[in-house]
């Protein structure tokens, strides 16, 4: 009896074991398999993100050196703002065309002209929507706000031949633009990328280049991960050792670096001129070794920690029951609030593995209240949503496990699921740069999903693709991991799910890769897509 029982028991255990392996393999395979792509007929336009509606006409308008740009707002300030957008467009096309287009602050008669205006802009298109029409008389972009005109300008750039992005004059080219009526607006208000400047530091010029590049895909948020175990990257005047000491390290032992407050303002201004909002993050209470290395009083033994240059996580924590910690944080939040126009401040909250659950929840509540006191909306990585002390304004950035608490309390969410949207995950196993802990993310896999797979639509603020920089040391490395995948995230954020499909996306992406090439971007040219 007992023998039979034993062999039954061994048999069932074996079956269970095999079953678990089978299920595990099945899930693993499903996740690593490349999603199927349907053949798609050749497209009539390659604008990316795909516009909401595109009605092609018969014929083409030809941009010439005599084309006039008319700019007009509903008041003087708006006209000035639209003038700057006209100037941005003029400068963008000057290099390849050698045209020195005249910009006129009026609504002139449409005739060989580009009109950019908010006059009669429709409110139902929202702040970022626009109408773009191209006829034999010229081009017109009408929007409710200048921001909408800026988004429309990105579509106009992509209606021009790819050579418009050349960094040298292209002689004798016909700069023709097809007749078209476009009506467009975004699906989600938040469409971001994150750059981790803590694991490796990137100078202001590198960040500006990325801002300029992603703006062409209508990305509207840049989240800067400004502190981590390996480095503190923003000058805080009250606590100078954060940069005197805490900034002077990075992964692999490089010299690190930091942004002065003036540098930060310069980045913010450059981004704002491209209608991108910069969101600063200080990761707490874990990921804080650089701060703990800067000031002894932040440590339980009163002693400063050593710099950290490895890539482990989960070993550092601020003291969550010590008032000195909160006075320090309050100074940081105050200084950053003063120089950051964004309505958000990100307070981290991920992988606080050396903080007790109770302390973690208490800490996230306390710090989010400090952020709110300074007039900002706190954002945190999961599991920040599990803190009972955060307010209903708190925004969850959902990257890993659960967003169960956020769903239960109706928190708004930014969807950044690691295995779908992390820009630092390798495209496949042979790629030297990047990490693979969340899996490989091919160009297609990065596109073939929707935020609503992870949260109810009404709670989704938008999508963000984070670039962690443990393995990335310079602009070329960043380019390689960001492009072309970010084009997919830009389209997921802009174009409604029903309007998207992978076959079309590949065509749009490949056409845009030609532009990236002309712009000097070191993008990843997946051999399976460029056969
Ligand atoms: C994270 O990837 N630790 C947010």
Image (cartoon, grey):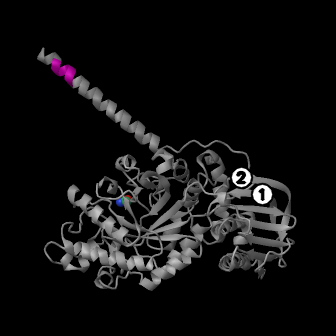
In the rendered structure, which segment of residues is drawn in magenta? 5-9
Q: Quadrant of ligand 1?
A: bottom left
C-alpha separation, residue under disc 2 versus residue under disc 1 = 8 Å
> In front here: 73 or 202?
73
Judging by the rendered image, the residue that carries numbered circle 2 is 53
Secondary-structure class at tag 2: strand
- In magenta stretch: residue 8: yes
| Label 1 element class | strand
Left or right? Give the position of 10 relative to 513.
left
In this picture, residue 118 sits left or right of residue 317: right
Is residue 531 something one can see in this rendering? Answer: no
- Let me know if residue 54 appears in the view: yes
Quadrant of res 353 = bottom left
Picture residue at 36% right of the left edge, 69% below the top:
371
Q: Residue at x 51, y 70 (%)?
A: 277
Residue wearing tag 1? 181
Residue drawn at x 48%, y 60% is: 465
């Amino acid at each position: 009896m007992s023998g039979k029982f034993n062999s039954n028991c061994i048999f069932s255990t074996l079956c269970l074991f095999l079953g678990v392996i089978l299920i595990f393999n099945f899930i693993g395979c499903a996740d690593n398999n490349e999603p199927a792509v349907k053949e798609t007929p050749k497209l009539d336009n390659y604008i990316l993100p795909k516009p909401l509606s595109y009605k092609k006409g018969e014929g083409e308008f030809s941009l010439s050196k005599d084309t006039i740009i008319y700019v007009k707002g509903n008041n003087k300030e708006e006209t000035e703002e639209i003038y700057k957008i006209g100037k941005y467009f003029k400068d963008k096309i000057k290099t390849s065309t050698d045209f020195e287009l005249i910009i006129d602050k009026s609504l002139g008669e449409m005739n060989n002209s580009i009109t950019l205006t908010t006059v009669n802009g429709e409110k139902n298109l929202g702040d970022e929507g626009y109408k773009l029409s191209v006829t034999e008389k010229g081009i017109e972009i009408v929007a409710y706000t200048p921001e909408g005109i800026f988004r429309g300008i990105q579509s106009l750039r992509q209606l021009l031949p790819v050579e418009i992005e050349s960094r040298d004059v292209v002689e004798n080219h016909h700069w023709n633009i097809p007749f078209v009526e476009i009506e467009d607006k975004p699906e989600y208000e938040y469409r971001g990328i994150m750059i981790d400047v803590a694991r490796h530091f990137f100078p202001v010029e590198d960040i500006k280049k990325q801002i300029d590049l992603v703006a062409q895909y209508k990305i509207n948020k840049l989240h800067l991960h400004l502190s981590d175990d390996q480095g503190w990257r923003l000058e805080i005047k009250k606590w100078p050792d954060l940069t005197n000491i805490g900034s002077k390290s990075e992964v692999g032992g490089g010299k690190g670096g930091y942004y002065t407050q003036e540098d930060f303002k310069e980045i913010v201004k450059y981004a704002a001129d491209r209608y991108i909002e910069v969101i600063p993050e200080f990761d707490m209470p874990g990921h804080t070794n650089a701060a703990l290395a800067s000031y002894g009083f932040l440590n339980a033994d009163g002693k400063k920690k050593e710099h950290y240059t490895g890539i482990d996580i989960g070993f550092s924590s601020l003291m969550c029951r010590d008032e000195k910690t909160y006075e320090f944080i309050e100074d940081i939040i105050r200084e950053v609030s003063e120089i950051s126009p964004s309505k958000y401040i990100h307070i981290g909250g991920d992988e606080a593995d050396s903080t007790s659950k109770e302390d973690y929840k208490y800490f996230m509540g306390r710090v989010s209240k400090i952020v709110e006191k300074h007039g900002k909306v706190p954002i945190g990585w999961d599991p920040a949503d599990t803190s009972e002390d955060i307010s209903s304004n708190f925004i969850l950035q959902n990257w890993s496990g659960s967003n169960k608490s956020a769903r239960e309390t109706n928190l708004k969410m930014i969807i950044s699921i690691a295995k779908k949207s992390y820009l630092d995950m390798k495209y496949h196993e042979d790629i030297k740069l990047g990490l693979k802990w969340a899996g490989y993310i091919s160009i297609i896999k990065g596109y073939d999903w929707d935020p609503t797979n992870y949260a109810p639509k009404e709670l989704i603020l938008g999508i963000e693709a984070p670039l962690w920089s443990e393995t990335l040391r310079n602009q070329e490395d960043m380019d390689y991991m960001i492009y072309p995948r970010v084009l997919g995230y830009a389209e997921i954020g802009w174009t409604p799910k029903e309007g998207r499909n992978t076959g079309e996306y590949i065509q749009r992406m490949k056409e845009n890769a030609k532009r990236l090439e002309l712009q000097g971007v070191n993008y990843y040219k997946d051999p399976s897509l460029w056969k």
